Amino acid sequence: MAIWNPAVECAKRSDIEKIQLERLKWSVQQAYDNVPMYREKMEKAGVKPSDIKTLKDIQKIPLTSKLELREQYPFKLLAVPMKQVVRIHASSGTTGQPITGCYTKGDLETWAECIARIATAGGVTDEDIAQISFGYGMFTGAFGLHYGLEKIGASIIPISSGNTERQINIMRDFGSTALIATPSYAMYLAETAQKMDMLKDIKLRVGLFGAEASTYEMQKELEQRFGILVTENYGLTEVMGPGVSGECEYKTGMHINEDCFLAEIIDPDTEEVLPLGEQGELVLTTLAKEAQPAIRYRTRDITRLIEEPCPCGRTSLRMEKIKGRSDDMLIIRGVNVFPSQIESVLIGQQGIGPHYEIVVTRENYTDHLQVKVELVDASLLDRYGELEALQRKIRNDLHTVLQLGVEVTLVSPNTLKRFEGKAKRVTDLR
Ligand code: DLL
């Protein structure tokens, strides 16, 4: 498959690091000169921009947390006058004060370039008709993908999310070949298309999915249902939105746009920087963001960096699929559980559908983990023996992976909630 910008994406390690160092110096200086929060943090740590002489020197600068960014709401992170800002996005703020993301004209160009690379890696070309089923609005997903796909020359359908049956009709009538959505909405779309008996009329070829965690099992399920190539991409409002990294067809991890982002992995508890290849929390520094630089931002996303060569020819470092967010990790009777571990057990099991819900409660000071899954065939509810055997199998499989007793509840088809954006699968009632 094609590579959008081989000069950068296939550059020698030493060349990439040279660009990174040059840009890191610029970005740190930009933040120090113009954003009081970064200047104060650096002064307190006794660091000056001139102390950045190698890439490793970044470790002298303190880390930045989500809470610190929130305190700068709405515009105290701006490193340029508002006059130069041409777009303002914001995170949803479901877990507190939203975080704004501001862009100069230059930032929008950089963003489109990053997306063009990732979308090309995922197989999109100027021949594609791309249906963008992310919500248009303050969320960075739709607009982010939009301008990158436009740069490639794809024909964009800016349908936004929701109105699921209409999505399927448009997909058929316009002959959409690329679908852009969250994996959970893509699954809902596949299911709706099947119900409408229209899967056969759909010409989709590729799916660029992201904005939430999904396992390889879920990806495979989506590939089979739609008959497409699915790749995943990653990003966050605090550093730009989508476009930080994305998979190529080999799915050996998500290729990072390293000329725009410097990635580190830290131990989330000790904050110590971990050696390449170890799993921990991803920390990102923007190298090309003008309006709103992010310096050593703790993403709370758990992953590992991969440097082994990828058969596609890109030389960039890659990020393994996000295992979960450090704040999504459930501690059940002392055992760490990521929802992604549960998903990988459930998807592909015979007899159950791809929708699930995780409910955590505490009874008599003891944590209780319940997993609700939908049956494919409602009549199984009347065949007690078979139902119990299926329940037991899922319970045993979950136990093998989690080393924990889990209550498995099988519910009727189409009774669990569907999502048009990011799925919310965990309810923690403790
Ligand atoms: O979700 C940006 C995005 C839009 C990425 C579209 C990809 C596609 P936020 O709403 O700020 O931005 O949410 C960022 O979502 O810290 C992760 O926890 C999670 N996330 C995003 N992509 C992935 C992914 C967008 N591929 C937060 N896998 C991040 C797992 C993801 N988690």
Image (spheres, rainbow, N blue to C red):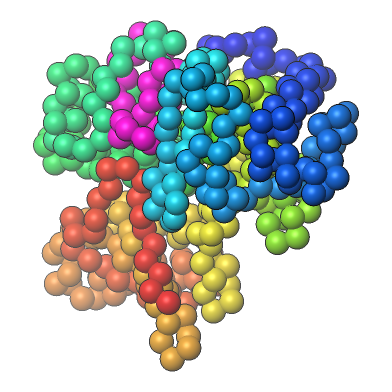
Q: Position of residue 161 (x, y in %)?
A: 26, 35
Front-lying residue, 387 or 293: 293
Position of residue 226 relative to residue 371, above or below, is: above
Residue 271 part of the magenta-drawn span: no
Apparent side of residue 89 relative to residue 33 in the rendered image (left or right): left
The answer to whether residue 98 is seen in the rendering is yes
In the picture, which quadrant includes the C terminus? bottom left
The answer to whether residue 277 is seen in the rendering is no
Front-lying residue, 128 or 297: 297
Q: Position of residue 130 (x, y in %)?
A: 32, 19
Q: Quadrant of residue 201?
A: top left
Front-lying residue, 214 or 71: 71
Q: Which residue is at a point 50% across and 15% down the rendered structure image?
A: 105
Apparent side of residue 83 relative to residue 312 in the rendered image (left or right): left
Q: Position of residue 196 (x, y in %)?
A: 11, 37
Q: Which residue is at a point 16% across and 37% down the rendered structure image?
A: 163
- Of all residues, the one furthest to the left in this rendering is 196
Front-lying residue, 196 or 42: 42
Position of residue 412 relative to residue 279, above or below, is: below
Q: Position of residue 320 (x, y in %)?
A: 60, 41
Stretch in magenta:
124-148
Q: Which residue is at a point 66% across and 47% down the rendered structure image?
A: 64
Residue 129 part of the magenta-drawn span: yes
